[in-house]
Image (spheres, rainbow, N blue to C red):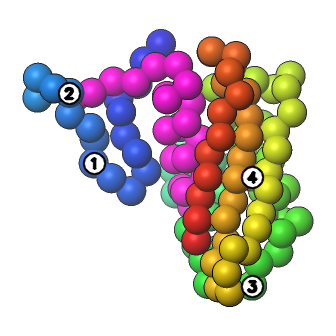
Amino acid sequence: MSALSHIAGGDLALSATGGLSVVTGAEQTRQALLRRLCTNPGAYIWQPGYGAGLPAKVGAVMDEAAIRALVLAQTQAETGVDQTRPVTVTLTTPKAGACLLAISYTDATTGTVQELTLTG
């Protein structure tokens, strides 16, 4: 299966020939997971439980346990993440006012361990 290439917050990607670019495998899962984590809950009328709303948490007091639980719940809902393998969510504060979220998961299509890192 393939999907249109789209990084959350950006435009649809174009192919080298000028058409719409498509993605498959691990890149498709990475884009889908990033979109899920950046979408506000309730933004999709037909799927009100879709989305973690992480960008809305920027600037708020960080509750590490709540963020970790939210990310784990959202990865469990993503079909491209292998649910039989553990998902690791690590939060660090590299400097005052900054947060680094590192997610390690196994892609269900390729079986490879993937890393997704978000900063805020």
Q: Which residue is mark 4?
A: 71
Residue 108 image point, x, y percent: 68, 19
Residue 74 image point, x, y percent: 72, 45
Dominant secondary structure of the residues highlighted in magenta in the image: helix
Q: Is residue 22 left or right of residue 48?
A: left
Element on which disc 2 rests: loop
Local crowd size for mark 4, using a 10 Å CA cut-off: few (<14), some (14–19), many (≥20): many
Q: How many marks?
A: 4
Give the Cα separation between the discs numbered 3 and 1. 31 Å
Which-is-in-front pick, marks 1 and 2?
Answer: 2
Task: Of the two numbered discs 2 and 3 on the same chain, state the one appearing first in sequence.
Answer: 2
Relative height, residue 95 to residue 27 (above, below) = below
Element on which disc 4 rests: helix
Q: Residue at x 51, y 47 (%)?
A: 35
Q: Amino acid at mark 4?
A: Val
The residue stretch that appears in magenta: 19-41
Task: Of the two numbered discs 1 and 4 on the same chain, state the one appearing first in sequence.
Answer: 1
Q: Which residue is mark 1?
A: 11
Please report contact status of discs 1 and 2: CB closer than 8 Å, yes or no: no
Q: Which residue is mark 2?
A: 15
Element on which disc 3 rests: loop
Give the Cα separation between the discs numbered 2 and 4. 31 Å
Residue 57 image point, x, y percent: 64, 74
Give the Cα separation between the discs numbered 1 and 4. 24 Å
